[in-house]
Amino acid sequence: MNQCRTTDYVMPKVSVILGVRNEYPVILGTIFSFIEELEFWGYEWEMIVVDNMSKDDTSSILKDKFRRWVKNGSLKVISYDERPANVTVRNVGVRAATGDVVFMADGHLSIATGTLHGMIQGWMKRGGLWHSAIQIWGDTRDIKCYGYEMKLRERFWGNLSRGCPKEVKRKNGVPVPYRVPMASHCCLMAGRKEFLDFGGYCEEFRCYGGGEPYLDLKWWLFGKEVWIHAPGLVRHAFGVNPRWDKVKKEKELRTKVYHRDGTMKSLVKPGDEFLRYSRGYAWNNDDFQYNFMLSAYTIGGYDWLQQRFGTYMEGRKGNRRYIDDIKRLRREVLKAGAADRKFIEERQVMTLDELLEKKPWQSYGDL
């Protein structure tokens, strides 16, 4: 770590990991947002873009656009072509990194000034895993998310927390950093050595989904904390790689248009053109259910796998094909997650049931 020339802060070297799949040109703004923030505070930095099977020439374009940083080694563009895997590419990036701390982020973000600095300084005081508050950019309204409220018994997931808990302390009306059970992983930060020592993300996850409860809860089980840097803000664009389409069907003219991720909608008027979004990663229902059962099994064990399995089966007992498919996925989970479950059992300092009983994140102490 280097001593900053203009402050009393100890300034660790920062590695930014961006997983990319068909996100050009949106990623250009994300890159500049990170670099401007880090250089403003004087951090030594490197950026590693992991191109995961993009078909939009992302790698070659970035190398051409940012020749200066590529030449001096600050920006590295590497490839992961084995399969679409949005959490595995983060592991790949962290293994290639040399920084003291690693930011792992989506390729479609804008970061408010002071956010990265605040997360880094918080980590230096308390360690653990750090997230920021998130502004979800849609085409109708913005939603600000401060993490997830834990509701694992129902869905092995959690509900979006759109405000800070009332117990959180405030300074000058602004909430201070506080602990959360888990949060969105559009931008998170950890110590690189600790992230690798903890095994990172489970690489048995399929294309998309399930990584958030897996990583955050593993951190808690291993005796570490998960934090929200509430004063900071990361603006996250839902949907990437925009394409303008002409509305042709009369039905589309009369109704709301839902984008592929199912989250955004807008009214379309005759003669309008509108912006369609396609995600860099797409998932199907089987992958989604497999991932969340895998997360439940590796973090909580066989009983939690059964809880997830039973939830997916409920209400579908009359569908023979569905029953066969979900049983097949359960067998695959037991096989794929065995090694990771053993690793967690060897390292955890409490079980998932003990964690949910103690709820250590409800201790809203100041830094």
Image: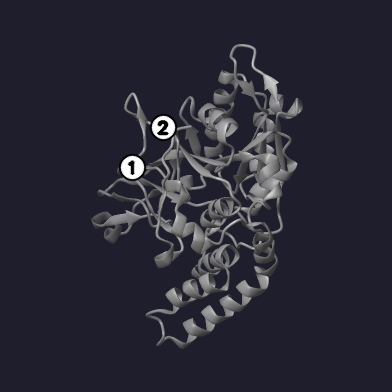
Q: For the point 46% across and 29% down, which residue is it?
A: 112
Query: Image quadrant for the N terminus?
Result: top right
Residue 83 lies, with reference to residue 15, above or below; the image says below
Residue at 67% x, 49% y is 91
Q: Residue at x 67, y 74 (%)?
A: 335
User: Badge 1 local density, few (<14 within 10 Å), some, or many (20+)?
Assistant: few
The residue to which callout 1 is attached is 163
Q: Residue 176 bears which disc, if any?
A: 2
Question: Mark 2 is on which residue type?
Answer: Val
Image location (x, y in percent) of residue 226: 52, 45
Q: What's the residue type where badge 1 is placed?
A: Gly
Position above or below: 198 against 76: below
Q: Secondary structure at mark 2?
A: loop
| Left or right, 284 with reference to 58 | left
Is residue 82 in view from this perspective? yes
Comparing 138 with 293, the one in front is 293
Total label count? 2
42 up-or-down from 167: above or below: above
Around disc 2, counting alpha carbons within 10 Å, would you say few (fewer than 14), some (14 to 19), or many (20 or more)?
many
Across and down, in percent, residue 31 comes to: 58, 32
The x, y position of residue 209, in whole percent, is 52, 59
Secondary element at tag 1: loop
Please identify the quarter of the rendering in which residue 20 is found.
top right
Which of the two labelled residues, at mark 2 and mark 1, occupies the earlier sequence position? 1
Looking at this view, is 304 or 144 the one in front? 304
